[in-house]
Amino acid sequence: MKILPSLFLHIVFLSLLLEFCSALDILTSNATIINGKTLVSSGQSFELGFFSPSNSSKWYIGIWYTKYPEIVVWVANRENPLGNSSGVLTIGPDGDLVLLNATTGIVWSSNSSRTEPGSAAQLLESGNLVLKRKDDITESYVWQSFDFPSDTLLPGMKMGWNLSTGVNRYLTSWKDDNDPSPGDITYRIDNPGMPQFVLRRGSEKIFRTGPWNGIRFSGAGVPSNIIFKAIFVYNNEDLYYMNEASDNSIITRLTVNQSGLLQRFVLNKGDSSWSTMYSTQNDPCDEYGVCGANGICKISSRPICECLYGFVPKSKREWDVLRWSTGCVRRIPLNCQQGEGFVKLRSVKLPDLLNFTLNKSMSLKECEAECLKNCNCIAYANSDNSEGGSGCFMWFGDLIDIREFSEDNEQDIYIRMPASELNQNKKTRVVLIFVISSLSGILILGFLIWYIIQRSKKKRASANNGEDIELPMFDLTTIITATKNFSLTNMIGEGGFGIVYKGTLSTGQEVAVKRLSKNSGQGLQEFKNEVILIAKLQHRNLVRLLGCCHEGDERMLIYEYMPNKSLDYFIFDDDRKALLTWQKRFKIAMGISRGLLYLHQDSRLRIIHRDLKTSNILLDSDLNSKISDFGIARSFGGDQTEIKTKRVIGTYGYMSPEYAVDGKYSVKSDVFSFGVLLLEIVSGRKNRTFHHPDHHHNLVGHAWLLFKEGRALELVDDISEPSFIESEVLRCIHIGLLCVQKLPQDRPTMALVVVMLSKDGEALPKPKEPGFFVERSCTETDTSTSEERRITQNEVTITVLEAR
């Protein structure tokens, strides 16, 4: 190891003298970085310094997100860690960045090849650490970390070759979560003639994208979108891929991990957690060569592997037990006789470029003729899909790693067949055309009969109903444009029956689009129910329905947009709950109670919500509460007080005992849910996942114990405590316990609840024991927050009306 005499003492002296500030983004030739000191990019996005992974005694120089220090995006000395924290990063006499240990040995160096040495290192806002000459404001850097990626690709970082220098930039996984040294998973551009991305474990291929087709990488390329712009450069000097941010409010990174998974993560600035935009190997067909030679993977089929047309399994016994690695062989061998031709295979990822030739100047017609002349040519395809298609791939030998895609913009390949197979294929097509034509005629006739019947039913139903719902209808194109084609970045929530997206109409109005899941068996019923009910409701504490969309399988509800999301977004988050002072919490509780009172008593229809919970309470810009999600709400007749159902739908922790156990629900069921909500608002804790070291009751049970012992104020959330009014808080706890009493007849009506909340000082009745006041087992209390899910029975719905 190289030693620099007396340099270390000199460095330590300069460190003490200059008191290097961690907020700087530049390291000059007379400054150092030691453990505890960092460089921070000008916009505070990235930070460089020393770090040691968990459960490790080794130290490294790395770059990480300032707000997310656990996400390290680049490591300098991956292959040569420091044994302790006594390292120094500085600029050496030769102008290179060097990492020194306590004995001034060089552990790592930038080893730039430029003739002019660097005199300053700067951490750019892109996450790129650059070494440059003094006062050089150009981007002609002496050295940059972007040329030596670790396991992460950042926007602006190139992957691929500098063909003039021979530098190859690619990703290498960490060895494991606590060891950033290079693992055996790599992701790089191979260039056997036409470039393609390949993911390897050692030398073994585990995934590939398919070759570049002039537009994108065949079969797995991700085109430019609203999050990032994909750039691919292929000329005499460069062959690289990179992406640039399309929206500065969204952060993105591409990472390869030691499990062999390639993932793109996205983060909206201001959010606290990353989302996975996409990953490779997200289905079995992404596995390299999963169907063996001359097989094709079809993810929508069962089993997923089939032999190509004209081929049969090499080992039927292996294929019968779903082991496809033996692949397929021709049913009838080729013999290069007259009459041979090609069968077109549409929309596939092209086979791997193992034994092939490429001619970029040929047309597809010329390619076919050339392949026919060569008896060893078994398939051909265009090499470039842009501008109508051009170029010629020809394969010789087995075809490996083909998968089918449903998209029309994937490539077609033409596979050579003997004359007998071509004739059989023609006969099969004639039979198929006849069968399809006959079935189409029958289906069209059946559809016309069904349409006439349904139309007459609708007319009769409209005549009997006597009430028209006047609600604007949005067309699907408008909604797709507003939500940017239901982009992941526009997703703002997910409920029991679908996903909610933020959208912006052409007028500039922001809306929330609830897209009901196509896979939900209950979706259509809930859609109709919500439209019918909420279209008739108008109240300041109910979310406003602006319209709906119903085209084909798509069913969507368009609401006013609530910028502050839902109550659970604030009340259960340790940081955000501080924004909800007691006055704001009380205002929210009063709004919910008035909204429920309107539903139960003052609206045109008497409505029971049945799924009142924190995630269904939305907050507008002024934190006014609005009740949402009427998908499972039910209306009552004038003389009805209770309904019994065998189909129990709701959310654990908020359902009343009589509904959860016997399927009976009434306005008192909503009162029970409101009581739970009120106690959660006061305490800032969830009812069902509440834990206490002295007992195993839920939050309601804990509140009851404190109330009986005269210690109810201990329930108050510490965050809101400085601003609370003691009498008001005690009154809310008391009212909450009145609402969650076991028997529905003991609970107050919402009219009485509103009065009790509004009039401080009046005496309140003594509450009785709450519902579900039984201690849970230790196992049950350890359940995670995933308990908030809808429950229903998979049986025919039978609803029995019982008037009282």
Image (cartoon, rainbow, N blue to C red):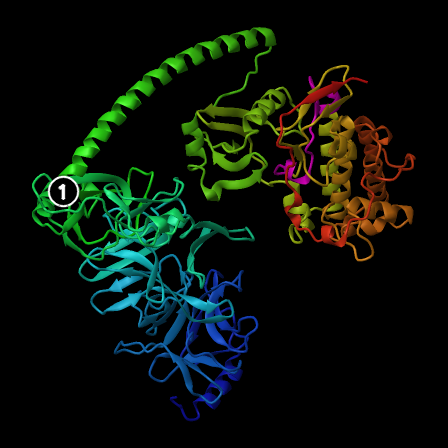
| Amino acid on which the number 1 mark rests in the picture | Leu
Q: Is residue 447 left or right of residue 158?
A: right
- The residue depicted at 68 percent of the width and 40 percent of the height is 614
Question: What span is in magenta?
Answer: 599-622
Residue 331 vs residue 279, the one in the foreground: 331
The image quarter in which residue 607 lies: top right
- The residue depicted at 82 percent of the width and 54 percent of the height is 695
Q: Position of residue 233 (x, y in %)?
A: 25, 55
Q: Position of residue 442 (x, y in %)?
A: 35, 16
Q: Work out whether residue 245 can be spotted.
A: no
SS label for mark 1: helix
Decide: is 83 above or below 680.
below
Q: Is residue 41 left or right of residue 429?
A: right
Considering the image in quadrants, where does the C terminus appear?
top right
Q: Position of residue 300 (x, y in %)?
A: 39, 40
Q: Work out whether residue 736 can be spotted.
A: yes
Q: Within 10 Å of the Cα at label 1, are there few (<14), some (14-19), or many (20+) other Cα atoms?
A: some
Q: Residue 600: within the magenta?
A: yes
Considering the image in quadrants, where does the N terminus appear?
bottom left
The image quarter in which residue 506 lies: top left
Residue 623 vs residue 391, the one in the foreground: 391
Residue 166 vs residue 299, the one in the foreground: 299
Decide: is 643 above or below 154.
above
> How many marks are shown on the rendered structure?
1
Q: Residue 328: within the magenta?
A: no
Among all residues in the image, which is located at the extreme front?
A: 317
Q: Position of residue 595 (x, y in %)?
A: 71, 29
Q: Is residue 376 left or right of residue 691?
A: left
Q: Which residue is mark 1?
A: 364
Q: Is residue 223 left or right of residue 516?
A: left
Decide: is 385 above or below 173.
above
Among all residues in the image, which is located at the extreme bottom?
A: 5
